[in-house]
Image: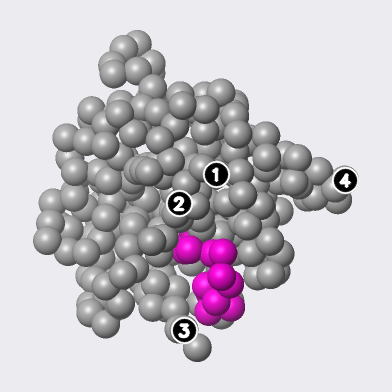
Amino acid sequence: MRKIVIAGNWKMFKTQVESKEFLQGFLPTLEDTPSNREVVLCVPFTDLSILSNSLHGSRIQLGAQNIHWEKSGAYTGEISGAMLQEIGIRYVIVGHSERRQYFGETDETVNLRLKAAQNYGLTPILCVGETKQQRDAGETESLITTQVKTALVGVDQNNLVIAYEPIWAIGTGDTCEAKEANRVIGLIRSLLTNSNVSIQYGGSVKPDNVDEIMAQPEIDGALVGGASLEPASFARIVNYKVN
Ligand code: PGA
């Protein structure tokens, strides 16, 4: 059975005070959320431990936005699986396009980080996606295939979420058409040995397009940036409507 996973990616937004304010507004909106929807917040490192204390007993799972592959060591600015595991973190975003673009993440380092996450019992959310230029050049399928295949060498597909995030749709308001997202996600699924991996769509998911996106048969959830920062809009996304 494929699980529905709706995850917020706060990126580098929200201090501890702001994250607690968000929770006050957001938690009550989950009362009627169907229990088969996994709700995840991937927040900055400084927010993780404070939220982990306040979320005890709630249905929200916490996720980090990065993980290093070594247990410990001289890696300034990085964080280890043991550090995340100790405070009850369940998910971690790996290979987000912003990490690839600004911080030199490659398919090879993505692969190392995926395996590290699994070694510590975390579920990695592997992000893949093409640029506008690659799409226009007809390279979407080959690029996605390479990203998925290289990233997944030696990775356990029983503990994995994938997010298809076309880069041109991230933070631009320019959502990928739901049917097209469905098609690419179908392609990603065809590359997997486990057809039960949950595959999300990400890129300008908003309250007004989430119902159509989630109605697509291949799409198992959403990875949400901007619209996850405000309790009412993330609540509407988590509580998407099924026809
Ligand atoms: P967006 O970001 O929803 O603001 O487009 C999505 C993401 O980067 O994961």
Residue at which label 4 appears: 137
Q: Which secondary structure, mark 3? A: loop
Q: Are marks 2 and 3 in contact (CB under 8 Å)?
A: no
Find the magenta span and give its range: 210-226
User: Of discs 1 and 4, which sits in the foreground?
Assistant: 1
Answer with the quarter of the image where residue 205 lies.
bottom right
Residue at x 38% of width, y 61% of height: 1
Question: How far across and down, in percent of the image, does residue 172 sit?
Answer: 66, 60
Q: Which mark is residue 90?
A: none
Above-or-below relation of 115 to 53: above
Q: Which secondary structure, mark 4? A: loop
Disc 1/disc 4 C-alpha distance (Å): 25 Å
> Is 187 contained in the magenta span?
no
Identity, as a three-letter code, of the amino acid under mark 1: Leu
Front position in the image: 164 or 87: 164
Front position in the image: 109 or 25: 109
Residue at which label 2 appears: 197
Q: Are marks 2 and 1 in contact (CB under 8 Å)?
A: yes
Disc 2/disc 4 C-alpha distance (Å): 29 Å
